[in-house]
Image (cartoon, grey):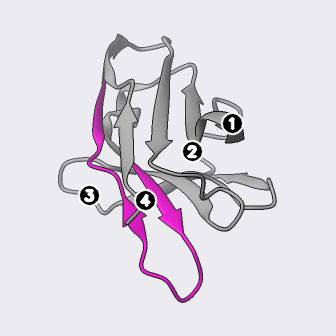
Amino acid sequence: QVQLVESGGGLVQAGGSLRLSCAASRNIFSIYNMGWYRQAPGKQRELVAAITSGGSTNYADSVKGRFTISRDNAKNTVHLQMNSLKPEDTAVYYCNAAKVLYRDIWGQGTQVTVSS
């Protein structure tokens, strides 16, 4: 069973930056699509950014131009670089691995808090 472990969350002022990391217990990037989701209190979990097994990326409109998803195949790690953070980016951020016909794999989440 593959495990995902997130890190890098914290408290930052508006306009600041954070870099989230998601370490996979083994190399799955060639067969799984990887994504970052977030869930704010009282809201549904939403997709923030994703990178396919082929390397294509896509972003939620709310983070385009500010967030960048990338992966390091040698270290089995996916990153989410978050710049120009806003208070509305405050949420628990989750790493996700998805593959057709397989159950999604989720990390435990990391809290990101952006103060105004």
Q: Do the residues under discs 2 and 4 have CB atoms within 8 angstroms?
A: no
Q: Do the residues under discs 4 and 3 have CB atoms within 8 angstroms?
A: yes
Viewer-side label of 2, 1: 1
Q: What residue type is disc 2 on?
A: Ser
Viewer-side label of 4, 3: 4
State the mark number for residue 43.
3
Q: Secondary structure at mark 4?
A: strand
Query: Quadrant location of the C terminus?
Result: top left
Of the numbered discs 2 and 1, the one sitting upstream in the chain is 2
State the mark number for residue 46.
4
Query: Quadrant location of the N terminus?
Result: bottom left
1 up-or-down from 85: above or below: below
State the mark number for residue 74.
1
Viewer-side label of 1, 4: 1
Query: What segment carries the magenta color?
Result: 94-116
Q: What residue type is disc 4 on?
A: Glu
State the mark number for residue 62.
2
Q: Do the residues under discs 3 and 1 have CB atoms within 8 angstroms?
A: no
Q: What residue type is disc 3 on?
A: Lys
Q: CA distance from mark 1 to mark 4?
A: 28 Å
Q: Is residue 44 left or right of residue 35?
A: left
Residue 69 visible from this viewpoint = no
Q: Is residue 115 magenta?
A: yes
At 55% from the left edge and 55% from the top edge, which residue is drawn? 35
